[in-house]
Amino acid sequence: MSLIQNLIPSFARQTESCACPPAAELGTTVKPTYEIKEAADVYAVTVFLPGVTRDGLEITADENQVRVVGRRAWQRPEAWTAVYRESADAAYELVLTHDNAIDADKIVAALRDGVLRVTLPKHEAAKPRKIAVS
């Protein structure tokens, strides 16, 4: 078990066995840098997607996974020759699997300056409860 699975066991970093459309239709994809933080009632996911606008962003939530696909809007000019480039001209794709502890109807996402912040609320059954002792 990896370190992230030890810290947050309900999420797994996985790109294989995806129930979503194949990445082949996107062409070459790059896994973006991201962070996952857990609170008592939500997971907060921050995904770094430089060059992606709202029009090029697609977020889907299936029964056990959240998929983020970001397409860059920038097109290389015809007369332009790259001497060096730090990042590839590829779409971003991130697939996070979970154990159905997410309430998909209440997911909130905001994109600003290439940083996507997604709030994944936990189901009521997954939230910790205080039990009164009599």
Image (cartoon, rainbow, N blue to C red):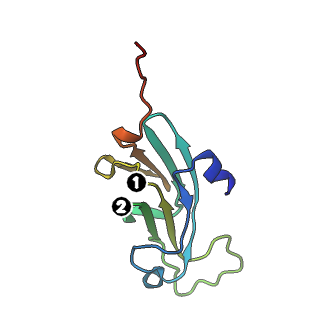
43 versus 27 height, above or below:
above
Task: From the top left corner, tell me how far across and down residue 111 is, in percent.
Answer: 42, 52
User: Which of these two is toward me, 70 or 59?
Assistant: 59
Residue found 61% across the figure and 75% down from its top: 88
Q: Which residue is mark 1?
A: 100
Image quadrant in which the N terminus is located: bottom right
Q: Residue furthest right?
A: 84
What residue appears at the point 34 percent right and 48 percent down from the top-left corner?
A: 103
129 horizontally vs 2: left or right = left
Q: Observer-nearest residue: 98 or 116?
A: 98
Residue in the image at 39% along x and 43% along y: 121
Residue 49: percent from left, percent from top: 52, 60
Residue extending farthest top: 134
Alpha carbon distance from label 2 to label 1: 6 Å
* Mark drawn on residue 53: none
Decide: marks 2, 1 in contact (CB < 8 A)? Answer: yes
What residue do we see at 43% from left, 15% from top?
133
Against 56, is 22 above or below? below
Examine the image and state in which quarter residue 55 appears: bottom left
In primary-sequence order, the first of circles 2 and 1 is: 2
What residue sits right under mark 2 in the picture?
63
Categorize mark 2 by other alpha carbons within 10 Å: few (<14), some (14-19), many (20+). Answer: some
Looking at the image, residue 94 sits to the left or right of residue 106; the answer is right
Say which quadrant the C terminus sits in.
Answer: top left
Q: Residues within 10 Å of mark 1 (few under 14, many from 20)?
A: some
Q: Secondary structure at mark 2?
A: loop
128 over 94 or under it: above or below? above
Q: What secondary structure is found at the residue carrying circle 1?
A: loop
Amino acid type assigned to the residue bearing label 2 in the image: Glu
Q: Name the residue furthest front.
A: 134
Tell me where residue 67 appears, x and y as whole percent.
Answer: 43, 64
Amino acid at pointer 1: Asn
